[in-house]
Amino acid sequence: MVNRHTALKIRKTHRYLGLFLGIQFLFWTISGLYFSWTDIDHIHGDHFKNLDYQPQTFNKLISPSQLNIASGINTIELRDINNTPYYWINNEQLYNALNGIKKNFISKEEALYIANKYMKSGLEVESIEKINEVGKHHEYRERLLPAYIISYKSDEALKAYVSVNDGKFQTVRHLSWRWFDFLWMTHTMDYEGRDNFNTTILRVFSLLGLITVLSGFLLWFTSSPSIRKLLKRKL
């Protein structure tokens, strides 16, 4: 059995570790509860999307081999931009699929057309603006830039994003997603970019959390009257 001085050290270590880690433990608990009690489809904004949308079909498209692409083609996707078909080639350039003319970017009106296809009808557009760069904490981080932000009149500050260069509908953001994103940051402890689950600070706090739990078990072991009686009997 450990002596009184050692037991006191264990108690103080456990107490101060608990005080130091308590706020982060609270964030982990709150974020974990939020994640487990919310519908991920709701977080993704599916209730704002036109989930029945079917891509338009086009006829009389030119063959991609007719396009003047010196490096050749390794990827190709078809885009519907304002009722006109476009090829998105090699993840870098749009070509009109009827005449082969390059298209360097889409307009605001074309971005609205694309957003209207993917969003539910009846939503009222409040504004549209173009962004060229975002910070590490921006809700549109790690996606294609530049992009148009289509803002809708909504209590949830609803926004849709359409990338400028390829004319693709990117994502939806709203209030519940932003809460999720904030709590995800506190859960992963990636206070720099939010999405890294292997941060040094998370690893350190996880180890300290383990030490706190183990010190609690050790504290119980050293202070339990039942354990003392059991050890005395063995002696």
Image (spheres, grey):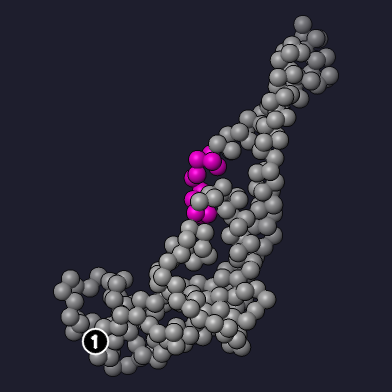
Q: Residue furthest left?
A: 70
Horizontal and vertical percent for residue 179? Answer: 63, 62
Tell me what residue is drawn at x 28 percent, y 93 percent: 60
Horizontal and vertical percent for residue 186? Answer: 60, 51
Q: Which residues are magenta?
A: 193-203
In the image, residue 205 sits, relative to residue 179, either above or below, namely: above
In the image, residue 210 sits, relative to residue 76, either above or below, namely: above
Which residue is denoted by mark 1 in the rendering? Answer: 100
Q: Is residue 61 left or right of residue 212?
A: left
Picture mark count:
1
Horizontal and vertical percent for residue 13? Answer: 68, 25
Indicate yes or no whether the magenta region holds residue 197. Answer: yes
- Which quarter of the picture shows residue 125? bottom right
Tell me what residue is drawn at x 69 percent, y 60 percent: 37
Tell me what residue is drawn at x 58 percent, y 34 percent: 207
Q: Residue furthest top?
A: 235
**From this viewpoint, is residue 74 visible?**
yes
Magenta stretch: dominant SS?
Answer: loop
Tell me what residue is drawn at x 48 percent, y 58 percent: 136
Indicate yes or no whether the magenta region holds residue 155. Answer: no
| Residue type at the position of mark 1 | Gly
Mark 1, residues whose alpha carbon is within 10 Å: few (<14), some, or many (≥20)? some
Horizontal and vertical percent for residue 183? Answer: 62, 55
Q: Quadrant of the N terminus?
A: top right
In the image, residue 7 sits, relative to residue 203, either above or below, namely: above
Q: Which type of secondary structure does the marked residue at label 1 adopt?
A: loop
- Which quarter of the picture shows residue 102? bottom left
**From this viewpoint, is residue 119 visible?**
no
Q: Quadrant of the C terminus?
A: top right
| Along the line of sight, the residue nearer the viewer: 83 or 21 | 21
Q: Is residue 2 left or right of residue 187?
A: right
